[in-house]
Amino acid sequence: MKNIYTNISERSIELQDQIADFLMKLVGTPSFSCKEKEVIAVIQNEMQSVGFDEIRIDGLGSVIGRIGSGSRLIAFDAHIDTVYAGDMELWDSDPFKPVLKDGRVWGRGSVDQKGGMAALVYAGKMIKELGLNDQFTILMTGTVMEEDCDGLCWQYLIREENLKPELVVITEPTNLNIHRGQRGRMEMEVAVKGVSSHGSAPERGENAIYKASKVALEIEKLHERLKSDSFLGKGSIAVTEIKSQSPSLCAVPDGASIHLDRRLTLGETRQSAVEEVQDAAAKAGCPEAQVTVPVYTQESYTGITYPADQFFPPWVLDQDSVYLKHAASAYRKTFAKEPVIDKWTFSTNGVAIAGMFGIPCLGMGPGDEILAHAPNESCPVEHLSSAAAFYVALVAEMNSHEE
């Protein structure tokens, strides 16, 4: 008699073409941040067709599909917004007209991260078919606005919808490895003031661009001093934009600002990061520089504005976590090999789920993260069925262990 994990693996392969077809639909429906309405409808229809028990849209616009009504709540998350295509000449084909070729689905969002969404929906179908939902209420979330503001969707789900699962599985691309953390990130603006004068007599003024440039050079030095973590790696900081203001292009600028991208490793906080930049500005001779964290205020496609500071803390799931042990066991039983336990280099919704609210998170998703945001993005079809099998196997593993 076959065991449950063999059944899961075989069924996922049977559904592989359907999962790929669904991913093609998703890739063929552009869904930039704050413009996800059409793709949400596509996901909603697919959830209905495969038999989800309940499907709803939250106030911010994320779709939430439910299977089961057990006492234990777990969630699987995929963000369904994408970045833009960039330079179209770098693509071999139209990024929004998906192509199935060489065993891969090609197009924008195939890896980051509509592949995870496609695998999730069909994992839900299998969970229901195999009767694995007795203990659990299982939520499959297709979340919005992640590319613009990591975790904002989950801040809304947790605070406004009171959604607090015991575990969230993030389906961002991991190349089918298991990930248990990531560095955090934050954005900062450093503003300095100068004194305007006519461009023909710059010595009469105080050039704000020169002052900001000195701060930027101190930021470069600060990067080299940032701490490192044995698992997440080193924190980083980079100047990503310089702006100035002036009465005229024939005048010395009286204001300038620099924008900073800061990546945070374990032990680094919002306060410590701001203080480091303030110290760098002081070393540059600008102790009066104003350091602020910008606030995200873009309107969702539903018309809601949900302001959030651009601060996203790092997070790590402890290597001794029972959830990580369940995930590793499910992986072994499904794929007959040891999982690679690793971390993301980029940011995910885990910054809110785990970083802000302390809800355990782990990740496993189809596709290689090096293709995220890249031209000719593509996801192996076999990754889709493998990821779906893992999600079902994890539920089966947790089902066999009463916590």
Image: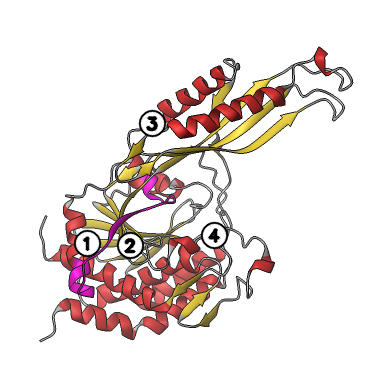
Between the C-alphas of marks 3 and 2, the distance is 27 Å
Q: Where residue 119 appears, x then y in whole percent? A: 37, 71
Q: Tell me which label, 3 or 4, sits earlier in the chain.
A: 3
User: In this orientation, does residue 382 appear?
Assistant: yes
- Image-quadrant location for residue 234: top left
The answer to whether the residues at label 1 and label 4 have Cβ atoms under 8 Å apart is no
Q: Which residue is mark 1?
A: 327
Q: Which residue is mark 2?
A: 364
Q: Is residue 210 left or right of residue 38?
A: right
The answer to whether the residues at label 2 and label 1 have Cβ atoms under 8 Å apart is yes
The answer to whether the residues at label 3 and label 2 have Cβ atoms under 8 Å apart is no
- Kindly identify the amino acid type of the residue bearing the numbered disc 3: Thr
Q: Tell me which label, 1 or 4, sits earlier in the chain.
A: 1
Circle 1 crowding by C-alpha within 10 Å: few under 14, some 14–19, many from 20: many
Q: Tell me which label, 3 or 2, sits earlier in the chain.
A: 3
Q: Which residue is mark 4?
A: 373
Between the C-alphas of marks 4 and 2, the distance is 18 Å
Question: What quarter of the picture does the C terminus occupy?
Answer: bottom left
Q: Tell me where the magenta segment starts and ends, as one range.
A: 330-352
Q: Where residue 366 appears, x then y in whole percent? A: 39, 68
- Kindly identify the amino acid type of the residue bearing the numbered disc 2: Met
- Image-quadrant location for residue 291: top right
- Kindly identify the amino acid type of the residue bearing the numbered disc 1: Ala
Q: Is residue 81 left or right of residue 250?
A: left
* Image vertical order of residue 315 relative to residue 90, above or below: above
Q: Nearer the viewer, residue 399 or 242?
A: 242
Q: What residue is at 46 percent from the left and 47 percent from the top?
A: 150
Q: Which numbered disc covers residue 269?
A: 3
Q: Where residue 208 appears, x then y in whole percent? A: 71, 22
